[in-house]
Amino acid sequence: MGFAPAAVALVSAAVGAVSAVQQQQARQRQQEYQENMARYNAQLAEQQAGMAEEEGRAAKRDAYDAALRKRQEAAGIIGRQRAQAGASGAQTDQGSALDLNLDTAEKGELDALALQQQGLDEDYRRRREAWTLRSNAQSQQAAASALRAQRRGTSATGTATLLNGLDNTGNNFRRLTAQLRG
């Protein structure tokens, strides 16, 4: 009569140990997957940050070029205005002709400065975006490190559980063999 409970206890302990090992392996695979995803997300965020910075630099360069073109356009308009005034016999260095030239130069410069400011604003926005992405990358790296540490802790806990289960199985086996002899 003592044989059956000892055998059931032995089988139960063995099944429990196998189940513990399988659960540990499943947890480790899940944690490893999460760690890999966190590392991938960190790399992706870093790449996106680099692209955002490059787009900001490009916007600033393009705005500078557009401002330069606007200044050249204003200079061309002023040249035509002076030529028309000179062709009509008016003085180009005084009076209404001079006022027209100065107004055109002022408007051209304001437009050029506005274009440059737009480029600077876009560059700033992109650098802020890059900073946010890099902050996210750092968070993802920290999460990956935490998951790795957790996985190592789970491995140690799982090993302890497995050893405990094997110890119980061994004790039950000794009891079973003692009962069979006695």
Image (cartoon, rainbow, N blue to C red):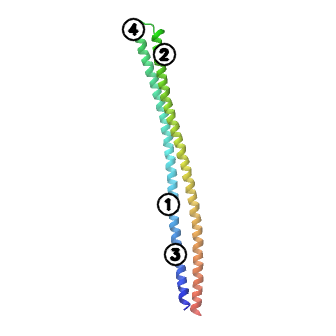
Q: Quadrant of the C terminus?
A: bottom right
Residue 87 bears which disc, if any? 4
Q: Which residue type carries mark 1?
A: Tyr
Q: Residues within 10 Å of mark 1 (few under 14, many from 20)?
A: some
Horizontal side of 158 relative to 98 (left or right) equals right
Q: Name the residue beneath numbered marker 2.
A: 102
Which badge, 4 or 1, is on the more N-terminal residue?
Answer: 1
SS class of the residue under badge 4? helix
Task: Give how far apart the Cα atoms at labels 4 and 2 are.
Answer: 19 Å
Residue 18 bears which disc, if any? 3
Q: Which residue type carries mark 2?
A: Leu
Which badge, 4 or 3, is on the more N-terminal residue?
Answer: 3
Q: Which residue type carries mark 3?
A: Val
SS class of the residue under badge 3? helix
Q: Position of residue 149 (x, y in %)?
A: 59, 61
Q: Name the residue beneath numbered marker 1.
A: 33
